[in-house]
Amino acid sequence: MGDDCRLLQIFNEYLADFLKRIDKDRAYSTYEDYCLRRRRLAAFLEYEYHVKDIPFKEPKGDFIDKFVVYLSTVKGIASGTIHAGVKKTSSDDLYGV
């Protein structure tokens, strides 16, 4: 992964690959769920940082904390829903670790 990789760019690539696997070993409903998570992440970047995307290596320790606060206070999402979503979105599968 080069230094010019961006967070939402990586997410988009993951979604494109995921879509190709629908009905093989992935469900469309899961794809829709990931698309929602991507939209929320994009909205957070606009709200918190006033940018469309950020370098993939840029998110620091407080990034997740700020994202969780945004989801709960701005979007009104329940804590349990947030933590399940953050855990799923930050899985090894998404980031290719």
Image (cartoon, rainbow, N blue to C red):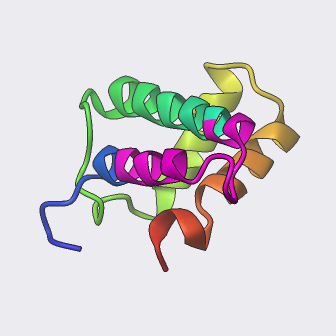
On screen, residue 58 versus residue 92, left or right, reads left
Q: Pinpoint residue 58: horizontal percent, then vertical percent.
A: 28, 60
Query: What span is in magenta?
Result: 11-31
Locate the N terminus and report the quarter of the image it occupies: bottom left
- Give the residue at x 44% y 54%: 17
Q: Quadrant of residue 60?
A: bottom left
Foreground residue, 25 or 72?
A: 25
Q: How many numbered marks appear?
A: 0
Figure check: 60 above or below 19: below
* Quarter assignment of residue 28: top right
Q: Is residue 70 covered in magenta?
A: no
- Quadrant assignment, res 49: top left
Q: Position of residue 66 (x, y in %)?
A: 53, 43
Q: Position of residue 37 (x, y in %)?
A: 58, 36
Q: Residue furthest bottom?
A: 97
Q: Is residue 15 above or below residue 57?
A: above
Residue 35 on image: x %, y %: 55, 33
**Residue 43 as seen in the image, left or right of residue 55:** right
Residue 88 versus residue 22 in the image, above or below? below
Q: Is residue 12 left or right of residue 40?
A: left
Q: Main secondary structure of the magenta part?
A: helix
15 in magenta? yes
Which residue is rendered at x = 68% and y = 53% of the image? 26
In the image, what residue occupies the spot 16% across and 72% down?
A: 2
Q: Which residue is farthest front?
A: 24
The residue shown at (37%, 58%) is: 59
